[in-house]
Image (spheres, rainbow, N blue to C red):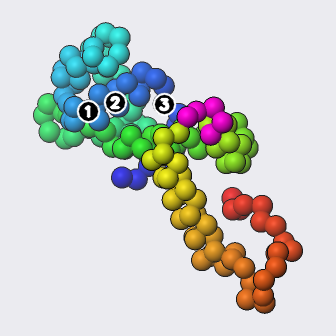
Amino acid sequence: MDVPRNLRRLSSRELDILAMLWQRGPLTLREAHEAFEEFGDPVGYTTIQTRLNRLVKKGVVRRTDRRPAAYEAAVAPSEVGAQDLDTLLDRVTQGRLVPLVAHFLTQHRLSPDEIQELKSLIDTAETKWKQSGHGPSSAGPGPSKTRSRGPSK
């Protein structure tokens, strides 16, 4: 699924509606209104209608053409999470990844599986970096005299 370019930060109530659609699948407005009590505070029918239509305008929910119309998530949970994480990275660490990762590594206990997964991700990133021409030069061993400041934006 493509993430809408103009995906704005979603409110917690909008995320509640998306969570409901991710779990339940396509729902009519009536079904969404009835189901929403399990995912958030009970709200009026027109409130659910307004929120769903706003999510459609944001590009994260689709409205079908059938009658009655059904609403379905147009993005995966990982896509919404990725957008929030990118925003966090930009706002808190000015795009620098190491301080963010360091914080989580020092403040949270990792399982052996999570540690292995992180090592694998780092190995993959290192391989891609080397394949893009940033690896050791063919002139011989020794430290590089230039330092990379990370990917250019």
Quarter of the image with the C terminus is: bottom right
Q: Is residue 90 above or below residue 127?
A: above
Residue named by callout 2: 19
- Residue closest to the far front: 112
Residue named by callout 3: 10
Are the two marked residues, 1 and 2, in contact with CB atoms closer than 8 angstroms? yes
Dot label at residue 104 = none
Q: Is residue 34 magenta?
A: no
Q: Residue at x 20, y 16 (%)?
A: 34
Q: Nearer the viewer, mark 2 or mark 3?
A: 2
**SS class of the residue under badge 2?**
helix
Question: Could one spot residue 88 in this view of the protein?
Answer: no
Left or right: residue 91 compared with residue 114: right
Mark 1 vs mark 3: which is more N-terminal? 3
Picture quadrant of residue 33: top left
Callout 3 amino acid: Leu
Left or right: residue 112 compared with residue 61: right
Residue 97, image x, y percentages: 67, 48
Residue 132, image x, y percentages: 62, 76
Q: Residue at x 71, y 43 (%)?
A: 99
Highlighted range, magenta? 105-109
Residue 133, image x, y percentages: 67, 79
Callout 2 amino acid: Ala
- Report the Cα–Cα distance between label 1 and label 2: 6 Å
Q: Is residue 139 above or below residue 6?
A: below
Residue named by callout 1: 23
Q: Residue at x 34, y 26 (%)?
A: 17
Left or right: residue 50 compared with residue 140: left
Callout 1 amino acid: Gln
Q: Residues within 10 Å of mark 3 (few under 14, many from 20)?
A: some
Q: Residue at x 14, y 31 (%)?
A: 68
